[in-house]
Amino acid sequence: MTFLIVLITSLLILDCCLLGLLILIQLPKKEAGVGVAFGGGATDALFGAGSGTALSNLTKYTATAFFIFVIMLSVVNAKARHASVSDLQKQIEKQNAMPITTPAMPTTPSAKAPGTNSSTAAKPVIPLTISTNNVLPEASPATNPPAK
């Protein structure tokens, strides 16, 4: 599918370039426009004096090829997207069909997993109370005992 998408896309790009050049080469009916910008006699010199009908026919064919390539690309992309969605659904269904097993957790606090350090073992949490009052209690003045 991917190769086909790349092939059709590259053909579409080439067709777009060719179609753009064919449109630019054609002589306008009023002898004005983009065709005159590249020189009025350029088309006659390149393709001959009676090239108007040949260029018109070639433009029609490349425009038809453009629409065919666009429709083909949209159909192939839709099929590729549908195939990827169905593959994803199959994988999800396969995972849902498999039973989920969880390892048993140790029930005693003294049990620890092998290879764990005693410093990483669970430690009891001690509640901590913080006072919002930052005032220190008043200290009594230092008194010297009376001398005898």
Image (spheres, rainbow, N blue to C red):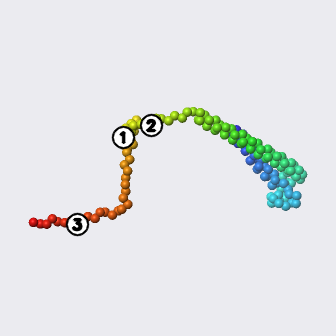
Q: First in sequence: mark 3 or mark 1?
A: 1
Could you say whether the residue bearing mark 3 is in a helix, strand or loop? loop
Q: Quadrant of the N terminus?
A: top right
Q: Quadrant of the C terminus?
A: bottom left
Q: Nearer the viewer, residue 38 or 2?
A: 2
Q: First in sequence: mark 2 or mark 1?
A: 2
Asked whether disc 2 touches disc 1, contact meaning CB atoms under 8 Å apart, the reply is no
> Label 3, on which residue?
141
At x 38% / y 47%, what residue is drawn? 125
> Label 1, on which residue?
118
Q: Quadrant of residue 65?
A: top right
Q: Classify mark 1: residues with Cα within 10 Å, few (<14), some (14-19) or many (20+).
A: few
- In the image as oriented, which residue stretches furthest toward the right? 50
- The kind of residue on which mark 2 rests is Met
Q: Classify mark 3: residues with Cα within 10 Å, few (<14), some (14-19) or many (20+).
A: few
Q: CA distance from mark 2 to mark 1?
A: 18 Å
Q: Position of residue 66 (x, y in %)?
A: 79, 47
Is 126 situated left or right of 63 in this image?
left
Could you say whether the residue bearing mark 2 is in a helix, strand or loop? loop
Q: Classify mark 2: residues with Cα within 10 Å, few (<14), some (14-19) or many (20+).
A: few
Asked whether disc 2 touches disc 3, contact meaning CB atoms under 8 Å apart, the reply is no
Q: Nearer the viewer, residue 72 or 37?
A: 72
